[in-house]
Image (cartoon, rainbow, N blue to C red):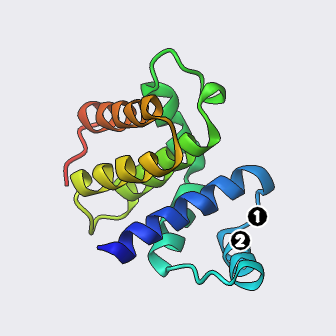
Amino acid sequence: MYKRRKAREQAVEIIFENMFNKESVSWIARMAQTYREIEIIPFGKKIAKYAIENQEEIDNLIKKYSERWSIDRISKVSLAILKMAISEILFISEMPTAVTINEAIEISKLFVEKQETGFIHGVLGAIIDNEKIKK
C-alpha cells in the first residue's frame, strides 16, 4: 500500500513539474534521480505518462466538472492531484475507482488547504457520477 501511495505522490510531483517545464516523464524522472537521488517508482511514472499524454482529455473533464471555476483559477498542486487521479481512473484498469479517489484525497491533505481537498473530492465525484465510470 505504501509503495502505491508514494508512487502516486511522485506522479503528482512529475505532473506538477511538467506544467512548468513541459519536459517528458523520463527526463523529469532522470533529473530527480540524478540531482535529488530519488528513484521514481514505475507505477508513478506510468500514471504521470498517461496524465501528460492525455492532458487535453483530462483538462476538458476538469473544466466540465469544476463548477464556476476556470482551470486557470485552480492551484497547480490541486490540478496535478486531479490529473493524477483522473489518469489513473481512466487509463489504469487494475485499481478500483474508490481507492484512487481515496488516495487522491489523502495526498491532497499533504499538499493543499482543506477547502481544496473538498474541491478535489467534488470534481472527482462529479466525473465518476456523470461520466458513468465503473470499476
On screen, 125 above or below 54? above
**Residue 23 bears which disc, if any?**
1
The CA distance from mark 1 to mark 2 is 7 Å
Q: Quadrant of residue 22?
A: bottom right
Classify mark 1: helix, strand or loop. Answer: loop
Q: Residues within 10 Å of mark 2 (few under 14, many from 20)?
A: many
Classify mark 2: helix, strand or loop. Answer: helix
Depth order, front residue of 24/14:
14
Q: Quadrant of the N terminus?
A: bottom left
Q: Residues within 10 Å of mark 1 (few under 14, many from 20)?
A: some
Q: Residue at x 44, y 70 (%)?
A: 6
> Relative to residue 16, is residue 97 drawn left or right?
left
Q: Where in the figure is residue 52, as x and y percent of width and height?
A: 60, 57
Amino acid at pointer 1? Glu
Q: Is tag 1's residue or tag 2's residue first in the polypeptide sequence? A: 1
Q: Residue at x 68, y 84 (%)?
A: 37
**Residue 110 bears which disc, if any?**
none
Judged by depth in the image, the label closer to the viewer, 1 or 2, is 2
Q: Is residue 23 visible?
A: yes
On screen, 35 above or below 101? below
Amino acid at pointer 2? Ile
Q: Where in the figure is residue 29, as x and y percent of width and height?
A: 66, 76
Q: Residue at x 53, y 41 (%)?
A: 78
Q: Residue at x 50, y 35 (%)?
A: 113
The residue indicated by pointer 2 is 28
Q: Where in the figure is residue 115, as x and y percent of width and height?
A: 44, 28
Q: Quadrant of the C terminus?
A: bottom left
Q: Are marks 1 and 2 in contact (CB under 8 Å)?
A: yes
